[in-house]
Amino acid sequence: MLDELSTGWSRFSVDFIPKVGRAIFSRGFDPNIDYDREQVESMRHALELHPAVLLFSHRSYLDGVIVPVAMQENRLPPVHTFAGINLAFGLMGPIFRHSGVIFIRRNIAGDPLYKYVLKEYVGYIVEKRFNLNWSIEGTRSRTGKMLPPKLGLLAYVADAYLDGRSEDILLQPVSISFDQLHETAEYAAYARGGEKTPEGLSWLYHYIKAQGDRNFGKIYVRFPEAVSMRQHLGPATGEVATDPAAKRLALQKMAFEVAWRILRATPINANGLVSALLLTSRGLALTLDQLHHTLQDGLDYLERKQIPMTNSALRLRTQEGVRAALDAMSGGHPVTAVDSGRQPVWYIAPQDEHEAAFYRNTTIDAFLETAIVELALAHAAKVESDPVEAFWSQAMRLRDLLKFEFYFADSASFRKHIVEEMSWQANCEQQLAEGGEAIYAMLRAKRPIIAGAMLRPFLEAYELVADVLRGAPAEISEKELTKLALGVGRQYIAQGRIRSNESVSALLFTTARQVVADQKLLEPAPDLEERRLAFLAELRSILADLATVDSIGWIKFDLRELQRRKDAKGTYVIEALEAE
């Protein structure tokens, strides 16, 4: 086991691996990685004081080579990187082992000896003040959004701290994001029910070759402020050291804090925003004017919330910047351009929706709370008694339903954020209390209207899984449930009962199964079928609210387009007034 775990640096490999990594990603990406220099200097100072665990977001196999490159070119200490033993094939195993990679087995639940050896090995590395590095998500996110953190290796690091091997250990969040990835085609295949391709020399050759297919844009690396293990776990002799439940809770809070900081530091890019808008158009092609005009509300919101954006996103303020983003994504990557008519138009074809969804999903966390506000308002508008209570009840219910998909602040902070999101309306409390038409007026005044663009695929996936549960066995397996949902989903797409191909996704059904399990809908009970039907009815009611929000968004889009054209041609004044 120790031979399998052993690692180190040779004089050759300490430079070889970063050079190879740069050579691989430079085939398709800008060779100059985008950093926040203040964050780099802050991390440099922190690493001088304590050993650290670098926990990176994981969207691509490239992440494993980007971190060593980033550390080397910023003259930061090298890191030991954990990787799955499946990557130790051929000559790659010895080369990686001599460049700081620690290969670990994938499934160790039934092997207490291996777990003990791994724990002691991690403790030894920490005690010697070497830095460690792995993905906090454990595996690549195939959907583009942040996965829940994995606690296994983190628990071993916590044990090293609690055993007194270091006075503190820093958990350093690392955000790695990309303008585009060629791996999205692979992720789309997984969503349609495909199987993972085993790694090997042939796989590696084709992976490297694919990096040169086209220009994938830039790579962005961010190092937000580190999380102190001592601050979260307390002294090594405290309660966490003796109470397993307290230790696990503290670990969860630490891991979620790291993931939260990654999300807040990851910049929104142009491809994510353009994909979100084109997916909302339901397959209809849009002109450059329409795209540019409609993107401005989202950009205004991001600036108002001080959410970081890449230069490509900032350039969406101009038509030239929008056109540059469209050109980069055209040719089915995932945008299709039609430029043989009077003016060019762009759309996302049905077969490309899963790939576009990956890019759109990288933006969702920035818009998540404002999207929930829209759905809660649409729900409250239907309620005749106490719309204020209905609004808050629905907002908290949506938070509960979506907790397996996204990261949320704690309940008190979430309520505070929702209040802040309502600030676009000066007298929001009064209008909310009036209910009905007053709430619809609030929605018409809101900018942007975003719930449909961000949340529809997830809610439709939940509805599909709830639908196929009707009459199904109580303890249906995950594989069978996914198979049924894929089949029924394809039927509903063909019938027009579901609006988007991206909702029919094995990746989304995995989380949907967690949702129905959380609702106790996979356990035998006398009233199981009744509760399954009630849950399906609830989801359909939420989707009806989403349709209401979408209709307001589309009317607003049409009116603003008419208003824009009216500036040049006054004849559109009558038409705009009639539409209103």
Image (spheres, rainbow, N blue to C red):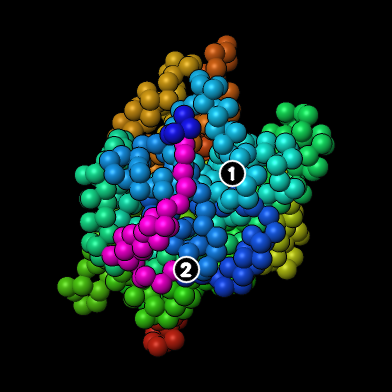
Rendering quarter of residue 427: bottom right
- Circle 2 residue: 73
Query: Is residue 12 found inside the magenta-colored segment of the image?
Result: yes
What residue appears at the point 29 percent right and 44 percent down from the top-left corner? 91
Closer to viewer: mark 2 or mark 1: 1
Q: Is residue 559 above or below residue 262?
A: below
Q: State the SS at label 2.
A: helix
Give residue 128's position: percent from left, percent from top: 62, 47
Q: Do we see residue 567 in this rendering?
A: yes
| Dot 1 amino acid type | Ile
Q: Bounds of the magenta span?
A: 5-33
Q: Give the tally of numbered discs.
A: 2
Q: Earlier in the sequence, mark 2 or mark 1?
A: 2
Amino acid found under the numbered disc labelled 2: Glu
Q: Which of 305/446 is in front?
A: 305
Circles 2 and 1 in contact, beta carbons < 8 Å: no
Residue 544 within the magenta-colored segment of the rendering: no
Circle 1 residues within 10 Å: few <14, some 14–19, many ≥20: some
Depth check, front residue: 199 or 526:
199
Q: Nearer the viewer, residue 72 or 302?
A: 72
Residue at screen point 41% across, 48% down: 98
> Dot 1: what SS?
helix
Who's the residue at 38% across and 47% down the image? 96
- Is 529 drawn above or below residue 575 in the view shown? above
The x and y percentages for residue 61 are: 38, 50
**Position of residue 556 measured from the top left corner of the image (x, y, whole percent):** 49, 67
Q: Measured along the vertical axis of the image, is residue 578 above or below residue 489?
A: below
Q: Which residue: 72% across, 49% down?
A: 168
Q: Taking 385 as reference, is 331 left or right? A: left
| Residue 566: mark in rendering | none
Label number found at residue 125 = 1
